[in-house]
Amino acid sequence: MHGIGNDFVVIDCRSRPLPLSAAAIARLGDRHIGVGFDQLLTIEPSRDLGCAFRYGIYNRDGSPAGQCGNGVRCVAAWLRRAGALAEGLTRLESPSGPVSVEMLRDGRVRVDMGVPQFAPAAIPLRESSAAPTYQRRLGAAEIEFGAVSLGNPHAVIEVADLAGAPVASWGPQLETHADFPDRANIGFVQVVSPRQVHLRVWERGVGETQACGSGACAAVAVLAQRGRVAADVEVHLPGGVLQIGWAGPEQPVWMTGPAAFVFEGNYFV
């Protein structure tokens, strides 16, 4: 499946646990010797009585992830096609806690991505107190970024020219910076207008992807803190467009976008 180009292998684990190690996940995710994906998603029985199902998230390198905005839309679409998702809002259990999802009549999925967490300890980021921007040196460059957690850690760098942004160099350097103890997803965002931004994301454990749903939410939250964007924003990513809405502090971020089925198969372990 994919959500505007962010692609996934989705495995039905409702009747038995995932039978793959981290190394096996990495082999399956290799686009040359496996199937290939940005993340692997599992659909499992919920451990939370208030949620219909649980989903797991694993990066291409086999490492676990806490949240995936494009992924949860695919999980919701998969469950709906399987006849397991009711109409209206449904709560699903993510690795970072419950999220609410809703299938819209046009086939898109609306997701409550939770309340953005800016406290450094919640991201986590080694910093004494929260601030709109932080500075770090990467080689000869002094960079400025905002940081937030949407169930996973994000750094957001505002740039004037997205096409020329140093995603492939700054992305991996900041992802693995010692001040991000759990590593981080690195977003590069260009503000076109208060209601439209363009975004590229270097995802931890994956590299640059066609889209990142939590990264789109993070970019809007960081920019909104600075008064750079409105409450409803179109986020244009290489793979397509997401609608992101955030009413402000202590409010959840809502993401709306598509989910698509590509093919199905069997993997023998």
Image (tube, rainbow, N blue to C red):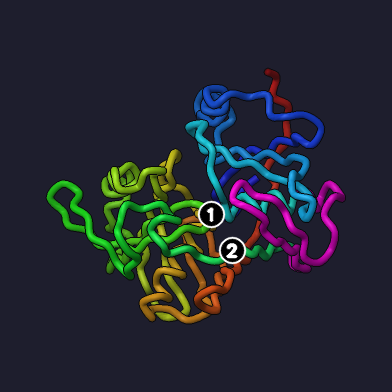
Where residue 114 is drawn, which disc sits there? 2
**Against 100, is 124 above or below?**
above
Specify the farthest residue to the front: 128
Residue at the image position 49 percent from the left and 67 percent from the top:
235
Q: Residue 132's spot in the image, x, y percent?
A: 33, 70
Identify which residue, 194 or 152, lies in the foreground.
152
Give how far across and how far down residue 199 sits, in percent: 42, 62
Type of amino acid at the residue the image marks with label 2: Gly
Please tell me whether mark 2 sits on a helix, a strand or a loop.
loop
Residue 178 magenta: no
83 in magenta: yes
Q: Secondary structure at mark 1?
A: loop
Residue at the image point whose x is 78% and y is 41% from the top: 45
* Quadrant where the C terminus is found in the figure: top right
Where does the N terminus fall, quadrant-wise? top right
Instruction: Determine the image quadrant of residue 91.
Output: bottom right
Whichever of callouts 2 and 1 sits on the residue coming sooner in the sequence is 2
- Left/right placement of residue 159 relative to residue 233 reads left
* Magenta-tinted stretch: 78-106
Q: Is residue 172 left or right of residue 51?
A: left
- Could you say where residue 223 lies in the image, as x and y percent from the top left? 39, 72
Above or below residue 266? Residue 194 is below
The answer for how far apart the CA atoms under marks 2 and 1 are is 8 Å
Query: Label 1 amino acid?
Result: Gly
Q: Which residue is identified by label 1?
A: 151
Marker disc for residue 102: none
Of 9 and 57, the residue lying toward us:
57
In this orientation, which residue lies closer to the viewer: 190 or 247? 247
Task: Give x and y (percent) for residue 201.
Answer: 41, 53
Vertical side of 129 occupied by 227: above or below: below
Q: Are marks 2 and 1 in contact (CB under 8 Å)?
A: yes
Identify which residue is drawn at 63% across, 38% down: 9
